[in-house]
């Protein structure tokens, strides 16, 4: 078996994790930049529930954010584009979006909230009964209800 020195590789000793992170995340960021992921995740908080219900961010490329919406809404968003760009950049904390491009496409219909059955509710409550009162218990109970609810 050839040693590392014979293969042209050299062992440099322990390295800080921060030195390894860029090489690990670069492929993921090529597919979706962190700013684009942030805009997708926080769209409703950025534009408000009314506009979020009729529009959806699709792609951020070279400062241009593509937003899917229906035809009549595209006109309204066009008029609000300066305010939307300011809201998006304000939310991100730096200038990322310089232009909006509207794509006529119907956003997916909103999903109705799932109905939680009583058995799932009681089973989740029983699962956390031994825990002390607090935010952790409440969060775990909510997670349990979600996991145990029928799909």
Image (tube, rainbow, N blue to C red):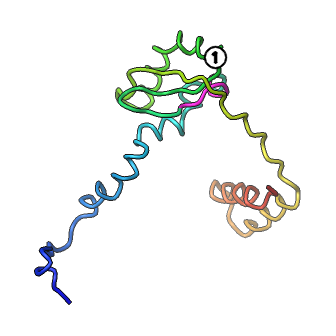
Residue name at image x 29 percent, y 54 percent: 22
Q: Say left or right for 7 vs 109.
A: left
Q: Say left or right for 46 vs 15.
A: right
In this rendering, the count of numbered labels is: 1
Callout 1: 10 Å neighbours few (<14), some, many (20+)? few
Identify whether 123 is placed above or below 84: below
Q: In which quarter of the image is residue 10?
A: bottom left
| Magenta stretch holds residue 53 | yes
Q: Where residue 29 appears, x then y in whole percent? A: 38, 47
Residue at the right extreme of this rendering: 118
Give the residues in magenta.
51-57
Q: In which quarter of the image is the N terminus?
A: bottom left
Identify whether 39 is placed above or below 99: below
Identify whether 9 is placed above or below 87: below
| Magenta stretch holds residue 79 | no
Q: Where residue 138 appears, x then y in whole percent? A: 69, 55
Dot 1: element: helix
Q: Where residue 30 appears, x then y in whole percent? A: 37, 46
Residue name at image x 83 percent, y 48 percent: 115
């Amino acid at each position: 078996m050839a040693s590392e020195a014979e293969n042209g590789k050299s062992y440099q000793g322990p390295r800080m994790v921060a030195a390894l992170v860029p090489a690990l995340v670069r492929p993921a960021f090529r597919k979706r930049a962190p700013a684009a992921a942030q805009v997708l995740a926080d769209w409703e908080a950025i534009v408000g529930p009314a506009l979020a219900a009729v529009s959806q961010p699709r792609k951020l490329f070279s400062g241009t954010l593509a937003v899917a919406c229906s035809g009549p809404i595209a006109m309204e968003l066009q008029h609000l584009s300066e305010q939307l760009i300011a809201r998006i950049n304000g939310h991100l904390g730096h200038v990322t979006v310089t232009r909006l491009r509207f794509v006529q496409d119907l956003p997916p219909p909103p999903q109705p909230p799932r109905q939680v059955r009583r058995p799932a509710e009681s089973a989740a409550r029983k699962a956390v009964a031994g825990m002390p009162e607090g935010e952790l218990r409440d969060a775990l109970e909510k997670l349990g209800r979600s996991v145990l609810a029928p799909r």
